[in-house]
């Protein structure tokens, strides 16, 4: 996902960008609410506790509300983020916002897990020996997160107290933990690079089972007592395991690597894939979205794309939404796989879009954008360099929505909260 040579080159580029940042500019003004629009109702559950909101990785939770305007509420750029890239996506629960980062320099790489309150004030931090790509999951008053880039070994999955960041336990694998964990039924499920897929106890970190026969970097999805994951290296495929035992249920080979998380909706599983990664496109770019029957792995449809699909598929009723390296966010019919519309984003879309009440949020090419999901109309966009006074850098962090705010990190060491005064 982040090969060593590409990583070293990106470190030098990022250091140069931070040294010669752009001057600050005024944030965009709030967009007016449509005439006759009903007042916003309070959120039923204003939390986004794991990557893509829930363990089915749909990028869409009932009862939430997104920001109606792209005003900056606050930006966290503390000294603990020096020379950092925030590739992970945030988790929001219990009045806390948790995210992780990779701290890179020419001499040493490390990581940090940060917890902020809703006003953007640092509550605690936890340093790691290795950089972090994994997105945290919050469950039962704890934070679970992995560590390591693709070239790292002997990496750990940690369980920390949400209240104070104290380490409860850690679990070490031989490979790396770019995968974002899913917590369900008292267990933590995650991919561990060459080590395959693990299930460990959420309470004490003891091994429950391990499925070794795959290289897994994507976040697994969990639904109906099954675990779904994809292999991006070696024998590329998407597969399904029993959540209780780790025994294989089915496996489907693919002609292209799977690096993004599968998404589960109803009786089907959806996954994007392609021959590019988070650093570059393939020599001859290819990508696709695949739909399989969750019980059997039988293919329902496949839709080919011009380049890699690294994002998870955001699900909203009969439609799905995903980003592509070709610079567009696509809307697709989930029944037949027909492309319905595409929305330009000005450059490769590496993070996953989020949809809330027909509002489709995408972070790509230095900007945050809001689209009307039903029509593809762009409702607003804001230049992130204008908000924080420096280039945003690489944008891999997928936005979380909670409390009427949009939360995400940038590749140039800033973590942002976007939403207007009323949080609508």
Image (tube, helix red, strand yellow):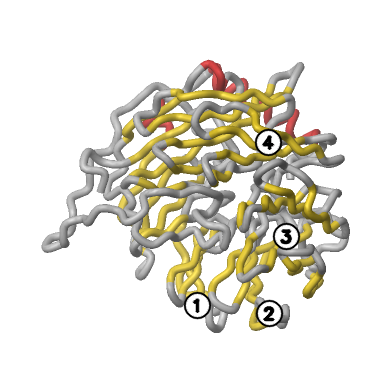
Mark closest to the chain's N terminus, 4 or 3: 4
- Which residue does the numbered mark 4 point to in the structure image? 158
- Which residue does the numbered mark 3 point to in the structure image? 258
Q: Which of the 4 image quarters holds residue 82?
A: top right
Decide which of 111, 163 is in the foreground and name it.
163
Mark closest to the chain's N terminus, 2 or 1: 2
- Which residue does the numbered mark 1 point to in the structure image? 333
Marks 1 and 3, Cα distance to the nearest angstrom? 21 Å
In the image, 69: left or right of 290?
Answer: left
Q: Secondary structure at mark 2?
A: loop
Mark closest to the chain's N terminus, 1 or 3: 3
| The label number, if any, that marks residue 295 in the structure image | 2
| The label number, if any, that marks residue 77 in the structure image | none
Q: Secondary structure at mark 4?
A: strand
Marks 1 and 4, Cα distance to the nearest angstrom? 38 Å
Is residue 215 in view from this perspective? yes
Q: Is residue 263 above or below residue 80?
A: below
Select label 1 or label 4 by which is in front.
4
Marks 2 and 3, Cα distance to the nearest angstrom? 20 Å
Marks 4 and 3, Cα distance to the nearest angstrom? 25 Å
Identify the residue at horizontal 72%, vertical 78% (top origin).
297
Q: Label 1: how many residues lie within 10 Å, few (<14), some (14-19) or many (20+)?
A: some
Mark closest to the chain's N terminus, 2 or 4: 4
């Amino acid at each position: 996902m982040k090969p060593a040579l590409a990583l070293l080159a990106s470190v030098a580029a990022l250091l140069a960008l931070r040294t010669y940042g752009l001057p600050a500019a005024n944030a965009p003004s709030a967009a007016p609410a449509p005439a006759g629009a009903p007042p916003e109702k309070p959120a039923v559950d204003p939390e986004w506790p794991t990557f893509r909101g829930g363990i089915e990785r749909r990028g869409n939770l009932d009862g939430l509300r997104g920001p109606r305007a792209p005003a900056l509420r606050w930006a966290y750029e503390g000294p603990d983020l020096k020379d950092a890239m925030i590739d992970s996506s945030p988790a929001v629960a219990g009045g806390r916002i948790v995210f992780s980062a990779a701290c890179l320099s020419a001499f040493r790489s490390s990581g940090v897990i940060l917890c902020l309150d809703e006003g953007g004030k640092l509550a605690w931090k936890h340093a790691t020996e290795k950089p972090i790509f994994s997105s945290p999951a919050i469950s039962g008053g704890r934070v679970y997160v992995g560590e390591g880039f693709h070239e790292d070994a002997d990496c750990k999955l940690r369980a920390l107290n949400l209240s104070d960041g104290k380490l409860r336990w850690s679990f070490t694998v031989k490979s790396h933990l770019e995968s974002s964990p899913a917590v369900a039924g008292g267990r933590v499920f995650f991919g561990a690079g060459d080590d395959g897929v693990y299930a460990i106890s959420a309470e004490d970190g003891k091994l429950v089972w391990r499925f070794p026969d795959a290289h897994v970097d994507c976040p697994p999805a969990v639904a109906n007592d099954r675990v779904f994951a994809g292999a991006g290296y070696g024998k590329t495929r998407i597969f399904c395991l029993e959540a209780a035992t780790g025994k294989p249920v089915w496996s489907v080979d693919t002609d292209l690597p799977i690096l993004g998380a599968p998404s589960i909706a109803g009786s089907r599983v959806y996954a994007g894939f392609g021959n590019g990664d988070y650093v570059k496109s393939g020599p001859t770019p290819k990508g696709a979205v695949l739909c399989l029957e969750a019980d059997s792995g039988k293919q329902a449809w496949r839709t080919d794309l011009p380049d890699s699909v690294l994002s998870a598929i955001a699900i909203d009723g009969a439609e799905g939404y995903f980003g592509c390296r070709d610079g567009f966010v696509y809307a697709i019919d989930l029944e037949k796989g027909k492309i319905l519309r595409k929305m330009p984003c000005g450059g490769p879309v590496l993070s996953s879009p989020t949809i809330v009440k027909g509002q489709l949020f995408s972070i790509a090419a230095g900007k945050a954008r809001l689209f009307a999901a039903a029509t593809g109309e762009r409702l607003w966009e804001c230049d992130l360099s204008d908000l924080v006074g420096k280039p945003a850098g690489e944008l891999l962090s997928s936005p979380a929505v909670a409390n009427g705010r949009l939360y995400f990190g940038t590749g140039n060491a800033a973590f942002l909260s976007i939403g207007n005064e009323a949080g609508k």
